[in-house]
Image: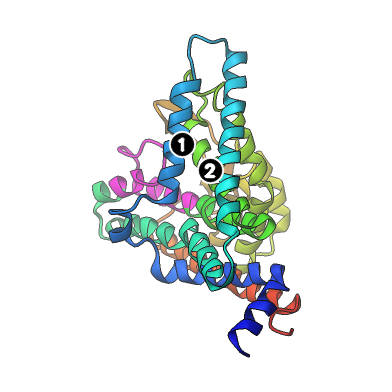
Amino acid sequence: MVMSDLLQHIASHPVSLALVITGCALLLDLWIGEPVWLWRNVPHPVVLFGRAISFLEKRLNNRKLSGKNRKRAGIIAALCLVLLAGCAGMALQQLDGILGLSAQLVAVTILLAGRSLYDHVAAVARPLSSGDISSARYHLSMIVGRKTDALAPDAISRAAIETTAENLSDGVIAPAFWYLVLGLPGIFIYKMINTADSMIGYKNSRYYAFGWAAALSDDVLNLVPARLTAALLMICGRSARIDLLQADAPRHLSPNAGWPEMAMALCLELRLGGPRIYQGRQIDGVMLNHEGRDNASANDITHALRLLITALILSAILCFGLAYLTGYFAG
């Protein structure tokens, strides 16, 4: 097939094209990861999103305003961020031909964080397995918001496993899902809102009212991806305890995080969750999977990382399979 025929064929199957791009992006991200040399010289898109969020927060989050007015300001900020991200994604998606396809593939690959998640969690498992607790705590502190300087080895392991499950959803499945639903505007908007939630979605005096819209939007955008992630993990871990998943996941303080975390707990036959300290405050998180083991170890982190890799590869295979079924390869 000559190039012009190929491009015409691709253009006539947008759903299949999006599936193929997503599958390729999942595998490319898993293979290449984050090119540190590049992001030392060029700002990562998420860094640019963070600058936009910080800009609006500094100018709109006036502590002298009432809580109601700060909430309104936060809604305006969230709408501005959605508009900015959506327009940026739409502009990039207007590119035609090979340049347009390449731009979409590069953009989606950059905005997936599977390999980065693997590398950061593996950096916790390595020193923990050799008994270097201080180093394990330090690397854990790079990827979780909770206080880590007094965590015992089993608590370090549980925290690393929990963040593996939650960030598989937030960092990979959710952005891929929104790209498939809305194209580049979808993945750009999701990453913008998810970044905003991580920056201003805290329940403290500074952000509670202003960050309400960002936090709520993030919860809504993750409703479907979190449950898809749970299903994916249950398949990869060959766990059939759907009854326990449905019973325990909704008990989590987050409307979404409990689903991938409970699925991971069932696959590893571990208890996860429980109390932890965030920003000096103790959070009484619920314990998930009461039938699981109490003590987690570095070996359990390694098992969780194997499930992560399996889930990423299976996701790519599913994308290619669905593309075939929708006519891209069969066309």
Q: Which numbered mark, 2 or 1, is in the foreground of this view? A: 1
Q: Is residue 79 magenta?
A: no
- Pick the quarter of the image with the N terminus: bottom right
**Residue 150 within the segment the image draws in magenta:** yes
Name the residue beneath numbered marker 1.
Answer: 52
Residue 144 against residue 106 in the figure, above or below: above
* Picture coordinates of residue 35, whole percent (x, y): 34, 62
Magenta-drawn segment: 137-163
User: Which residue does the image show at 66% across and 60% down from the upper left?
Assistant: 180
SS at badge 1: helix
Q: Which of the 4 image quarters holds residue 234? A: bottom right
- Please report whichever mark, 2 or 1, sits nearer to the chain's N-terminal start: 1
Asked if residue 156 lies left or right of residue 168, the reply is left
Q: Which residue is mark 2?
A: 192
Vertical placement of residue 295 versus 329, above or below? above
The amino acid at mark 1 is: Ala
Residue drawn at point x = 51 percent, y = 37 percent:
196
Residue at 50 percent of width and 72 percent of height: 27
Count of marks placed on residues: 2
Q: Residues within 10 Å of mark 2 (few under 14, many from 20)?
A: many
